[in-house]
Image (cartoon, rainbow, N blue to C red):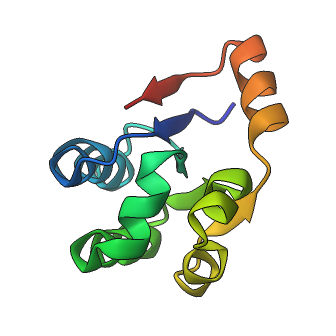
Amino acid sequence: MDKKLTILWTSGNPGTAHLMVFMYAINSVLNHWWDQVEVVAWGAAVKLISEDQSIQDKIELAQKQGVKISSCISCAAQYGVVDKLIELGIEVIPWGEPMTKLLQSGAPILSV
């Protein structure tokens, strides 16, 4: 059985993104702590992605290491950044139901 971690990233703080979200996601893959790591950007994180080149660079690095990056389409639409996220190779989908299923299943979710 695969060990999959979902990181729910809602913070708009760049330090949190660099020194927690991506540090842990990338190291989790490189050190084989988890078989799969997915970062789900929601809320203020979506806006940060669209505005901060250093975050965009970190996303590209994470993707190259095998970290899946996804975003809430409703948040992206409200911030007007759907196209930008897609351009960055981020999956942009409705996350309400999938997140509910993950939570109800007891899957590991790290919320930041």
Q: Vertical placement of 12 versus 76: above or below? A: above
Q: Residue at x 33, y 48 (%)?
A: 12
Q: Residue at x 59, y 70 (%)?
A: 90
The quadrant of the rendering that contains the C terminus is top left
Looking at the picture, tell me which residue is in the foreground, 42 or 107.
42
Where residue 81 appears, as percent x and y from the top left, is 58, 73
Q: Vertical placement of 94 versus 50: above or below? A: above
Q: Residue at x 58, y 79 (%)?
A: 89
The quadrant of the rendering that contains the N terminus is top right
Q: Residue at x 42, y 76 (%)?
A: 64
Looking at the picture, tell me which residue is in the foreground, 88 or 13.
13
Looking at the picture, tell me which residue is in the foreground, 75 or 57.
75
**Residue farthest to the bottom, as pictured:** 87
Where residue 105 appears, as percent x and y from the top left, is 76, 15
Where residue 19 appears, as percent x and y from the top left, is 16, 47
Q: Quadrant of residue 58?
A: bottom left
On the picture, is 88 further left or further right than 13? right
Picture mark count:
0
Q: Quadrant of residue 102?
A: top right
Q: Vertical placement of 59 versus 68: above or below? A: below
